Amino acid sequence: MTKRTSGILLHITSLPSPYGIGDFGSGAYQFIDFLKNSEQSYWQILPLNPTDIALSNSPYSSCSAFAGNVLLISPEFLIRDGFLTQNDLEKTDFSEERVDYLSVAMHKVDVLYKAFRNVKKEIFLNEKFKVFCQENEAWLNDYSLFVALKEKFEGVCWSQWPEDIREREPATIEIYKGELHESILRETFFQYLFYTQWFDLKEYCNKEGIKVIGDVPIYVQHDSVDVWVNKEIFKLDEKGECEFLAGVPPDYFSETGQLWGNPVFRWDVLKSSGYEWWKKRLKHNFDCCDIVRIDHFRGFVAFWEVAKGEKTAINGKWVKVNVYSFFDELLDYFDEFPIIAEDLGVITDDVKEVIKRYRFPGMKILQFAFDNKQDNPYLPQNYIKNCIVYTGTHDNNTTKGWFRQEATKEIKKQLFEIVGQEPTEDNISLALVKLAMSSVADTVIFPLQDILGMDESARMNQPSTIRNNWEWRVKVSSFDFSKQKQLTSFCSSHSR
């Protein structure tokens, strides 16, 4: 990221689509055209992995670090590609503004089952399907079996399954593969559809000069195929339950910290394998995206570990990681290592030293800048060129919402001194966009909500809460000429 460039943060689920949730259909291609016409260089998204209504639909809580979220498959393109007919789709009346995950999931699953029934007798005659299965065998077979087993055992966590399958005894696995053959084939087919549509979309994106920035959560969910298959690399007891949970201590977002509930890694075991699991995970994500943001990067230096049974993250402790061994191994393995280090929150000198040593670009958030301290690292005057500046992220309020709900009189006074005009609800979003663009940073990324000047009703996520998150959607009418022209003007000043 040496050239001065900019881009937009907008997750797939927020795209326009007639099917209740953003997907890989025509709305995604229209957004790419909007990016191109606005002279943007990047499209940043959130993790593409499966989500779960029981886990509040968070893309950061998934049953797989490799599989794709089938809710993002476009029914429109299933018709185009011959997997469905128009008669297979029922009329829908979904909201254009919010995702109703329960209704959407019921509808999408029904549509996907129809597509599977239409092709299951001939699916192995599809050469592309066979190639997909061969190329993704390392994760695909275990994932499809895991989903089929979850269905068989009515959704209970894998650690509560009968011991023989919980412990993956080979003879038992073969029995279940035979018993659940059709369910396994169905889930494999769904992943084929997902990745076929995603790579078509990414190819179009790259052809139009746009790079995709993906997102990798550092941790995985306990009830996931990753932990079931790789129990040895996590701190678990003899029955597969978590001995310790991941999180962060009290911070900007929560006075009691955040207790995520994920198992923590056994870094000694990871090291003994040459960090093989991480190599596979990052290669998969580098194949899917051009650049990858590593969420909670500081967890590679030291992680906050909380004993099971604790109700909050307050009573945890920092545990150090041999970070130089890890990154030296990965940088030797990969020809290119295009990552962004999410270095927000409690960042100590040792974390800063790692980022500096490997020249990983970190993140700067303008909403965090205004505390009247001249050494605040989020103030534009303290930026370096090799960083990514955001007005806010998916975890922040929109800038207008932040100004209305969180900005104090002192913050507003400092804003006036820095931006050179009286800040108001109507001008604050673009004022911070311009402030980011005028900084020395090589790259700036904006949530689309801030480009559109939207208030708190368009917030994507509020950490430590479980309701009304990940639901916001944009209407196709927002991709209009006036916004393209405005962004083009900002980009011209930024690329000076």
Image (cartoon, grey):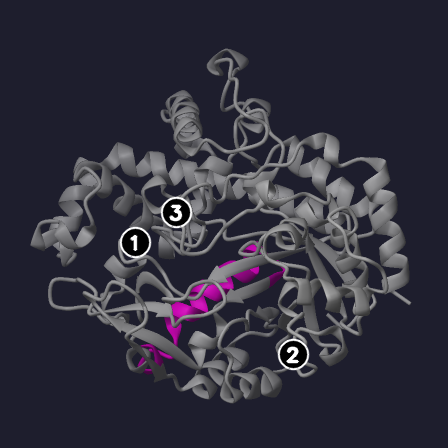
Residue sitting nearer the eye, 459 or 136? 459
Q: Earlier in the sequence, mark 1 or mark 2?
A: 1
Q: Nearer the viewer, residue 422 or 437?
A: 422
Residue 63, horizontal then vertical, whole percent: 34, 50
Identify the residue shown where x is 43% and y is 33%. Answer: 101
Q: Are marks 1 and 2 in contact (CB under 8 Å)?
A: no
The Cα atoms of the two marked residues, 2 and 3, are separated by 31 Å
Image coordinates for residue 357, horizontal then vertical, percent: 59, 88
Residue at which label 1 appears: 224
Residue 376 shows which numbered tag? 2
Foreground mark, 1 or 2, reads 2
Q: Secondary structure at mark 3?
A: loop
Q: Which residues are magenta?
A: 270-291
Q: Are marks 1 and 3 in contact (CB under 8 Å)?
A: no
Residue 467 in view? yes
Say what amino acid the circle numbered 3 marks.
Answer: Ile
Front: mark 2 or 3: 2
Res 325 quadrant in image: bottom left
Residue 148's image quarter?
top left
Q: Secondary structure at mark 2?
A: loop
Q: Is 222 colored magenta in this rendering?
A: no
Q: Is residue 350 above or below residue 234?
A: below
Mark 1–mark 2 distance (CA, rounded to whole Å): 39 Å
**The N terminus lies in which quarter of the figure?**
bottom right
> Magenta region, mostly helix, strand or loop?
helix
Instruction: Determine whether 111 is above or below 472 in the image.
Output: above
Q: Amino acid at mark 1?
A: Ser
Element class at badge 1: loop
Which residue is label 3 attached to?
Answer: 466
Whether 274 is among the magenta residues is yes
